[in-house]
Image (tube, helix red, strand yellow):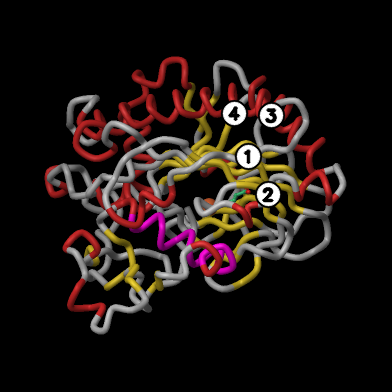
Amino acid sequence: MTATTAAVPIFPLANLEQHVDALRKTCHETGLFYLRLDDAGACERCAAAAREFFDSDDATKAICSYEASPAFRGYMRLGVENTAGVIDAREQIELGREDGICDGVAQRLVGANRWPDNDGKLRGACEPWLAAMSAAAARVTRALSLGLGLEASTLDDRVLGQAPHWQAKLASYPPDVGPGVGAHSDSGWLTLLWADQPGLEAQLRTGEWVAVPPRDGAVAVNLGEMLQLASGGYYRATPHRVGPSQQRRVSLPFFWNPSLSAIVDVVCDPSALPWTRDRPPAETRHSLLRAYGANAFKSLARSHPLVFARHHPDLCVLEDGTVAARDEGDAAAQRPDDQIYCQFSSFSSPTTPHV
Ligand SMILES: O=C(O)CCC(=O)C(=O)O
Ligand SMILES: [Fe+2]
């Protein structure tokens, strides 16, 4: 790893609209930046409550186990989640939006979050963080829309829709157990990450990996595959990973995603934009589904095979990422249009699962 964090600029949330052009260029070339928050106190208080939870005993954690949640929400102990088939070295609580209406399997992702029985302490510390991240992600989205030469609201109106299906994790990586999470790009829109220790690494266009350590008062932001798709490949979904850590590392990834009912399409003319890197290589088939909800369900099903098998025994995920009923004789013949692949070139392997 030779690149330094000088490759990763910082933009202030407070007056982001004054940085639209620099933000556009960064998101085109690397897809990674720090966002200076007006106040990072909500992140710090949430991390403190998360630390307290992770320090509690197994019985306390089991109360909010994800095993009881068809929507993949709740506490996951070390060793139950994987990225592209390799176990992630972290324990976590998985959270998500609790309402939303859509057709098909993605409706199964709508459900209640699961909290420990501690008088609402963890929940109370999380909610301000979730609200702050939602507001920040919405503001970044508006600036990115302007960067594509669109109205500020176009990406919201034409892609994200009425009920952006945010997801979030409170994660704890124990020390000395090897790499935390393997290389992947996130399958949603924008990821805002607060962490208390170094560990995050991102890949530049050159192939070089760069360390993205925490910065005071800021979160790291990386772009997801749905944003790359909607921008015609102009904005770059950022490959990243979590390296080994010598100390326990608590991180708070927040994923801002399209509505479960969104069908994602290209919303701009990428050839009218200033390209300062090579265009994506010849398009390859990739298991990104244009229907965001189906794509999100497929990702969670692959990352959490136990919950998938327990709560969704009527379904299977086919090799190509399509979710089908188990008893369909010819699943391929019965796929709805919105589950058809988009032609998309990406870093990801077909099994890269991340939300
Ligand atoms: O915990 C982190 O630092 C990042 C985790 C991550 O990349 C993910 O959950 O998608
Ligand atoms: Fe990620």
In this view, the residue in front, 273 or 256, is 256
Mark 4 or mark 2: which is in front?
Answer: 2
Magenta segment includes 301 = yes
Tell me the magenta residue range: 294-308
**Residue at (26, 78) in percent of width and height:** 331
**Above or below, 144 relative to 42:** below
Q: Are marks 4 and 1 in contact (CB under 8 Å)?
A: no
Q: Position of residue 203 (x, y in %)?
A: 51, 57
| Residue kind at label 1, given as amino acid type | Leu
In the displayed image of the protein, which residue is found farthest to the bottom? 329
Q: Could you tell whether 103 is left or right of 49 in the image? A: left
At label 1, counting other C-alpha atoms closer than 10 Å, the crowd grade (few under 14, some 14-19, many 20 or more) is many
Residue that numbered label 1 is attached to: 252
Q: Secondary structure at mark 3?
A: helix
Above or below, comparing residue 188 to residue 310 in the picture: above
Amino acid type at mark 2? Tyr
Question: How far is mark 3 from mark 4, CA to CA?
Answer: 14 Å
- Tell me which label, 3 or 2, sits earlier in the chain: 3
Task: Residue 161: give its label.
Answer: none
Characterize the local packing of mark 4: few (<14), some (14-19) or many (20 or more) Cα atoms within 10 angstroms: many
Taken as a whole, is the magenta stretch helix, strand or loop? helix
In the structure shown, which secondary structural element does the residue marked by tag 1 occupy? strand
Which secondary structure lies at badge 4? strand
In the rendered image, which residue does mark 2 sit on?
75
